Amino acid sequence: MNHKSIALSAIIVWSIVAILFTGIFIYFLVGRPSRFSLMSKRFDTETIIEKKTLDSSDIHSLDIDWDAGQIQILPSTGQDIIITQSSYYQVEPFQSSIQGDILEIHQTDSGFYIFPFSRFHSSNITIEVPPMYLETLQLSLTSGSCNGNDLAAEHLYVSITSGRVTLNGRFQNITSELTSGNVSIETNNLPDNLFVEMTSGDMALKIPDNDGFQVKLDKTSGKFQSDFDFLVNPEQEDIYIYKSTSSRKYSVDMTSGHFELRKLQPSHSKAKSNTVIKSRLIEIGYDRNGNKLPPPLLFPWQKTK
């Protein structure tokens, strides 16, 4: 085969490749507008993408994984969990599944992922939860924001890459991991355990005044602020003791950032919120200290464990 034939063959092969890639690009551009399109359909107003209603009888934990957008966790008056997703773009509906007694809610990727044109279309989600004392509330947020009011959980896990999380309610054990972003948590009871790991960002935790706890602070850089009157042992400068060496031992690990530990100041609104949460706990089988009462543990329509 001479050089002209080789050159001609190469031209033909590369022309075919170019045609194939052009076809694929056009398909992504106009054939799948909700997921791959550079010209995804944009609505004039925020539009409901998906809405689901789930029976809460066998659900005792929530696992929420969201990449971009706003999350609202609100109390509902009925026995169902209602999930509503909305967006200004034609995005993929969220996915949900029940694993054991855990309701998992995940955002489905909706964007264009061919470099350098990558972008992600956000969507917002509202989760209406009936009054219940959750075993676990787990939140993973890549970006965006999350707000939750009058929540109650034995274990609270918050993990954010960026964005803002604001939660209040009653949380017995708290774990928070921040790459960046802002986390604000108010709890009407004193947590038994606290673990915070921060690469950067800001976190503020408000807890009631109490009879004592201690904080182990492992800080490379950043700022730690508190209005609790701590005692520091000169031989253990990373241990902060409030009132007494209580069995409550909290851990804060900071590479950088800003961590605040504040006293929850009594107010009419906080007292009212606390009363509402306590009354809900009693209704579902917990006393005012969060201890389980004899059966029935949950609402009449809920299945006891």
Image (tube, grey):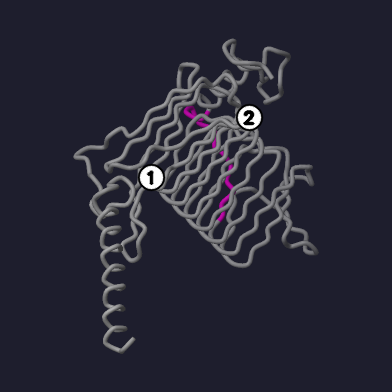
> How many numbered callouts?
2
Which of disc 2 and disc 1 is earlier in sequence?
Answer: 1
Give me the residue at 36% from left, 41% from top. Answer: 92
Where is residue 74 shown, x and y percent of the image? 45, 29
Residue furthest front in the image: 1
Where is residue 150 shown, x and y percent of the image? 51, 29
Residue furthest top in the image: 300
Q: Nearer the viewer, residue 144 or 165?
A: 144
Residue furthest bottom in the image: 3
**The N terminus is located in which quarter?**
bottom left
**The C terminus is located in which quarter?**
top right
Q: To which residue does mark 1 refer?
A: 69
Where is residue 84 shown, x and y percent of the image? 38, 30
Rounded to the nearest angstrom, the CA distance separating label 1 from label 2 is 27 Å
Determine whether, in the image, residue 175 is placed left or right of residue 234.
left
Please report the bounds of the magenta region as a residue range. 259-270
Q: To which residue does mark 2 refer?
A: 100
- Magenta residue check for 268: yes
Give me the residue at 51% from left, 26% from top. Answer: 273
